[in-house]
């Protein structure tokens, strides 16, 4: 009996679906791109249950004839290319002919399409799990409507890996936002559980599309970008957010190459480097970059979902993006802090596969010089680096006009379980201490995280909250409002009072006691992002993770100078916790070096 055999068409389609159809948002992306390729002016997307039970895409594009409609559900049937050579000059978003049969293989799929006004009837095709069950004439408007129901009904192993309905709907929302930004001439509508959550004007004005998606609040804080490098045939247009318009992730960054939305580490890094010296805090600025290049300098056929492309010269793209962005920022924020030497350093040292470095102070610039570590004693001024030392004597220390450390850090003074003596601070981040059994190095941020987390965890009911004299109003997108509404009780138990006061506005009237007012919005958005990425989180999981985030937000930061009294208070509280050696995330908070460890490091063993 032969060991090798040819797979049947249905099995092959299901295997192909594994690459093309990862989740509901993959389906929406493929079908909306087909609608765009059909020159649609209006595209409407409706989902239920996060797209797991129902997806509908309706467009007013060119539609298909009955013959083409029957061919469209077959593998490798496409109107976009004919020969392999056509891939080097591809202008359409779709080209492989795999989307429709792959989607139909793992769902209950129907297609209704009508070619033009001269055609009296539309063509209706129904497919269930890869098997065509009905083909007939039907009534229908010009264009195409595709309905996908019961996704992964015949592949339950795939279905169990999907996340919550809110999370899947969020991914669809993100996809549609990026497609709307890449095609401002198309009017998009997105309906989630019978509620309109996204609508763009389709008037070909990118700024109007931006404000319809992100709200009018972004209008004063966006800057147009226009760059044309005729030598390398690279053009860049779009909008950049001012450095004060930040998001905790890259959700507000859209990279478009030849009208195709892509992910690109090198372009994202060029953005990071251009903004690095201007950002007042950690975060990612808004950016919509529409990059045009010669089609023969890119390869779009390198990723199953066409979300990445390969550049023939990635360094040219990096340089062009970096220069275009810095030109805009320098003009808007003159005198710019981006010195010419720094610019040359950032541009010329680029490598397509960089080694990204991080530190306790957040994402560092790719080519930033290593930080100079300072060793501070209890003295007011740092010692010269050439004679840097840690003061060992503290008997004569005098503190003047210094508030109690417990008031500064929110710590209750208690007798520690074991005693450490602070000696000094390194780089305004690490506290050097000594105990009876060796030398201790403490990460002040991680240590304070542990203290605050343990303190908040002691509250079995609602976390103590502070009533705000003046409420905070936060703009939210549709997904964020849905999550806040669904998890209202959990937010309340975490110390928040949140009320919907408009279609896209949330009022915050109470905050957890330990959260600074300035951190309120970032804290809530971080919780929302966590919920979106969780798979059916339990109340206990949410509480644990939210307490982690709260402790991190409220803790003293790396880079904050502490006096000896504050260091001692922090150490005492840390030594009073049950797990003083790690922060709530599992990162080291304190490291001990025994005398034997020090002997080994200084090669004194054996003497």
Image (spheres, rainbow, N blue to C red):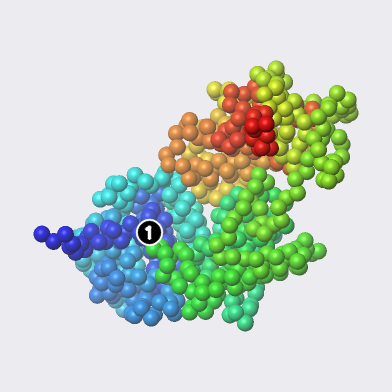
Across and down, in percent, residue 498 comes to 59, 37
Dot 1 falls on a residue whose secondary structure is helix
The residue lying at 75 percent from left, 25 percent from top is 421
Q: Total marks drawn?
A: 1
From the top left corner, tell me how far across and down residue 447 is, in percent. 65, 32
* Rendering quarter of residue 432: top right
Q: Can residue 135 be seen in this view?
A: yes
Residue that sits furthest to the left in the current view: 1
Q: Is residue 56 left or right of residue 106?
A: right
| Residue at (25% x, 61% y) in the render | 12
Q: Which of 195 and 88 is in front in this view?
A: 88
Classify the position of the N terminus by image quarter.
Answer: bottom left
Q: Which residue is rendered at x = 42% and y = 64% of the image? A: 303
Residue 428 or residue 131, whichever sits in front: 428
Would you say residue 325 is visible in this rendering?
no
Neighbor class of circle 1 (other Cα within 10 Å; few <14, some 14-19, many 20+) is many
State the image coordinates of residue 445 (x, y, percent, origin top left): 67, 36
Residue positioned 67% across, 24% down in the render:
437
In the image, is residue 23 above or below residue 83?
Answer: above
Image height of 541 relative to 221, above or below: above
47 with respect to 71 (left or right):
right
Answer above or below: position of 224 versus 84. Answer: above
Up-down relation of residue 499 to residue 370 (above or below): above
Q: Which quadrant would residue 270 be assigned to in this image?
A: bottom right
Quadrant housing residue 288: bottom right
**Residue tagged by mark 1?**
27
Q: Residue 139 or 575: which is nearer the viewer?
A: 575
Q: Position of residue 75 (x, y in %)?
A: 27, 68
């Amino acid at each position: 009996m032969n060991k090798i055999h040819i797979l049947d068409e249905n099995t092959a389609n299901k295997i192909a679906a594994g690459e093309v159809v990862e989740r509901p948002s993959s389906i929406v992306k493929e079908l909306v791109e087909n609608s765009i390729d059909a020159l649609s002016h209006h595209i409407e997307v409706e989902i239920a249950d996060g797209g797991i039970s129902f997806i509908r895409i309706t467009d007013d594009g060119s539609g298909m004839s009955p013959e083409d409609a029957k061919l469209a559900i077959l593998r490798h049937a496409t109107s976009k290319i004919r020969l392999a050579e056509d891939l080097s000059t591809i202008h359409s978003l779709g080209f492989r002919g795999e989307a429709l049969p792959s989607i139909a293989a793992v769902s209950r799929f129907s297609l209704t399409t009508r070619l033009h006004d001269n055609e009296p009837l539309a063509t209706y095709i129904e497919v269930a799990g890869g098997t065509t069950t009905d083909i007939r004439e039907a009534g229908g408007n010009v264009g195409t409507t595709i309905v996908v129901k019961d996704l992964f009904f015949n592949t339950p192993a795939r279905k169990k890996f999907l996340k919550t309905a809110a999370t899947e709907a969020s991914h669809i929302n993100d996809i549609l936002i990026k497609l709307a930004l890449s095609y401002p001439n198309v009017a998009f509508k997105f309906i989630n559980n019978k509620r309109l959550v996204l609508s763009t004007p389709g008037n070909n004005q990118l700024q109007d599309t931006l404000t319809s998606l992100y709200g009018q609040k972004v209008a004063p804080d966006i800057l147009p970008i226009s760059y044309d490098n005729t030598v390398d045939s690279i053009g860049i247009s779009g909008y950049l957010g001012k450095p004060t318009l930040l998001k905790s992730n890259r959700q507000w960054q859209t990279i478009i190459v030849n009208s195709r939305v892509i992910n690109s580490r090198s372009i994202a890094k060029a953005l990071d480097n251009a903004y690095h010296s201007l950002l007042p805090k950690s975060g990612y600025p808004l950016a919509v970059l529409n990059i045009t290049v010669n089609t023969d300098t890119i390869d779009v056929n390198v990723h199953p979902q066409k979300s990445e492309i390969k550049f023939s010269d990635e360094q040219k793209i990096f340089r062009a993006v970096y220069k275009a962005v810095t030109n805009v920022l320098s003009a808007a924020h003159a005198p710019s802090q981006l010195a010419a030497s720094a610019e040359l350093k950032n541009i010329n040292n680029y490598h397509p596969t960089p080694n990204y470095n991080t530190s306790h102070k957040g994402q560092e610039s790719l080519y930033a010089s290593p930080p100079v570590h300072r060793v501070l004693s209890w003295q007011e001024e740092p010692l010269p680096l050439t004679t840097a030392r840690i003061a060992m004597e503290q008997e004569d220390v005098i503190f003047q006009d210094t508030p109690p450390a417990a008031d500064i850090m929110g710590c209750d003074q208690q007798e520690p379980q074991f005693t450490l003596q602070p000696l000094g601070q390194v780089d305004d981040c690490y506290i050097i201490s000594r105990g009876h059994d060796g030398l201790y190095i403490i990460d002040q941020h991680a240590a304070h995280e542990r203290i605050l987390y343990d303190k908040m965890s002691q509250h079995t009911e609602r976390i103590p909250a502070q009533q705000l004299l003046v409420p905070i109003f936060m703009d939210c997108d549709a997904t964020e409002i849905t999550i806040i509404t669904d998890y209202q009780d959990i937010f309340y138990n975490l110390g928040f009072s949140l009320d919907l006061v408009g279609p896209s506005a949330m009022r915050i009237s109470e905050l957890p006691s330990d959260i600074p007012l300035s951190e309120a919005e970032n804290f809530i958005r971080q919780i929302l992002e966590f919920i979106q990425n969780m798979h059916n989180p339990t109340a206990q999981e949410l509480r644990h993770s939210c307490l982690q985030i709260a402790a991190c937000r409220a803790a003293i930061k790396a880079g904050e100078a502490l006096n000896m009294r504050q260091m001692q208070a922090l150490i005492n509280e840390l030594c009073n916790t049950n797990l003083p050696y790690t922060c709530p995330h599992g990162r080291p908070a304190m490291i001990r070096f025994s005398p034997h460890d020090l002997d080994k490091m200084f090669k004194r063993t054996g003497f």
